[in-house]
Structure formats: structure tokens, C-alpha cells
């Protein structure tokens, strides 16, 4: 199971322009999920939402505990509702001993060690598909790098440069 945050979906669809990433996950047996909060965030941008809706197979997780998001928002007020809900989905899946990975970027990803959650960023997902699944070529990674670099999307240059190695 891959639980995506809004920023990862925006990066994959709108900036990197590589919806293949979702197909690769499904091909390898991963369920694609978002939370209700991520769904609502996606709906706020009609262009992104339209592109997102063209992909079937996303499950909307609606069993997120509101007390979890409230508690996390007090500890980490800089996180938005989508990020908070994805982290809480990770807590729930971990508690149930289910196989999952939260696909979430930047500040929320930095909480991986603190909360012992399975968290990867968007670039980490791309690298996994290149290096372990052999589904994305080095040439495609170079194109992804260029697309993301030219976009307004902000990813740490050191992390982004991993696509070129």
C-alpha cells in the first residue's frame, strides 16, 4: 500500500509529468491510497483534480482518527491537513501490522525516524522504481529531473540530483 500526500501527486502528475509512476506501483501489487483530506486538497485545484480523476484505482482512506490529526497538528503546526492525515494513516497501518509506505515530502518526511513510520518522498519513490524495480530508465530520470527542476515545485537539490546518478 502506498499512501500519497497531495504534494507527491501534484509533483508526479503536474511537474514531473510521469503518471507511469502510479501504474508501476499497481503493476507490482501496491494499492494506491489517499486520505479524505488529501482528496479535498486535490479538489481545490480543478486542473490537478481533473488529471488525478483520470487515474482509476485510488482508494480513499476514511478511517483516520481525528484525535490523531489534532494531536499531531499541535506538535507540528507547520504541517497541513493532508500531511497530517497521511501520517495518521501510517500510524493506523503500522498499528495493524499492515504493509504500507507514506509518500510524503519535505518536513513531514523528516518525521520518519521520530515516529518509526515507513515514509518515502516522491524522489525516493522514483529512485525505487529505477534502482530496484528497473521500471524507470536513467533517461526517464533525466527527463524527470529536468521537468521538476523547471517547475515551481521545491525539492532539495541534493535529493533531486539523485535522479541523475
Image (spheres, helix red, strand yellow):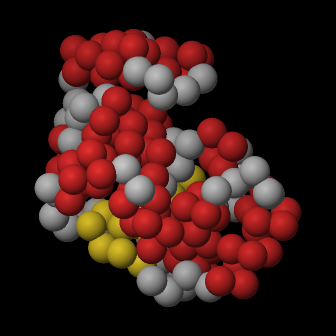
Q: Is residue 81 visible?
A: yes
Whether residue 120 is visible to the viewer of this picture, yes or no, is no
- 83 displayed left or right of 29: right
Rendered-image quadrant of the N terminus: bottom left
In this view of the protein, which residue sits in the foreground, 129 or 56? Answer: 56
User: In the picture provided, is 21 more to the left or to the right than 92?
Assistant: left
Query: Residue 151 appears in which quarter of the rendering?
Result: top left
Q: Quadrant of residue 81?
A: bottom right
* Residue 88 as seen in the image, left or right of residue 55: right
- Residue positioned most to the right: 75
| Position of residue 146 measured from the top left corner of the image (x, y, whole percent) | 34, 13
Picture coordinates of residue 142 (x, y %)?
30, 14
User: Viewer-proximal residue, 154 or 122?
Assistant: 154
Determine whether 155 is above or below 68 in the image: above
User: How far from the left and from the top, in percent, is residue 63?
Assistant: 50, 86
Q: Is residue 62 above or below residue 113?
A: below
Q: Nearer the viewer, residue 93 or 156?
A: 156
Residue 39: image location, x then y, percent: 40, 66
Residue, x 69% and y 43% (percent of image)?
A: 107
Residue at horizontal 30 percent and vertical 51 percent from the top: 46
Q: Residue at x 64, y 56 (%)?
A: 80
Residue drawn 76% across and 68% down? 72
Is 13 placed above or below 99 here? above
The image quadrant where one finds the C terminus is top left
Q: In the rendered image of this protein, does residue 7 appear above or below residue 126?
A: below
Amino acid at each position: 500500500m502506498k499512501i500519497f500526500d497531495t504534494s507527491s501527486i501534484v509533483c508526479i502528475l503536474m511537474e514531473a509529468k510521469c503518471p507511469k509512476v502510479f501504474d508501476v506501483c499497481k503493476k507490482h501489487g501496491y494499492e494506491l491510497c489517499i486520505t479524505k483530506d488529501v482528496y479535498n486538497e486535490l479538489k481545490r485545484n480543478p486542473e490537478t483534480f481533473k488529471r488525478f480523476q483520470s487515474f482509476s484505482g485510488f482508494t480513499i482512506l476514511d478511517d483516520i482518527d481525528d484525535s490523531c490529526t489534532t494531536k499531531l497538528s499541535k506538535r507540528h503546526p507547520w504541517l497541513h491537513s493532508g500531511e497530517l492525515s497521511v501520517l495518521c494513516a501510517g500510524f493506523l497501518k503500522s498499528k495493524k501490522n499492515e504493509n504500507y509506505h507514506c509518500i510524503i515530502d519535505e518536513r513531514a518526511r523528516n518525521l520518519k525516524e521520530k515516529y518509526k513510520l515507513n515514509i518515502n518522498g516522491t524522489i525516493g519513490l522514483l529512485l525505487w522504481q529505477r534502482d530496484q524495480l528497473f521500471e524507470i530508465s536513467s533517461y526517464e530520470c533525466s527527463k524527470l529531473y529536468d521537468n521538476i527542476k523547471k517547475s515551481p515545485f521545491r525539492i532539495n537539490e541534493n535529493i533531486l540530483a539523485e535522479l541523475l546518478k
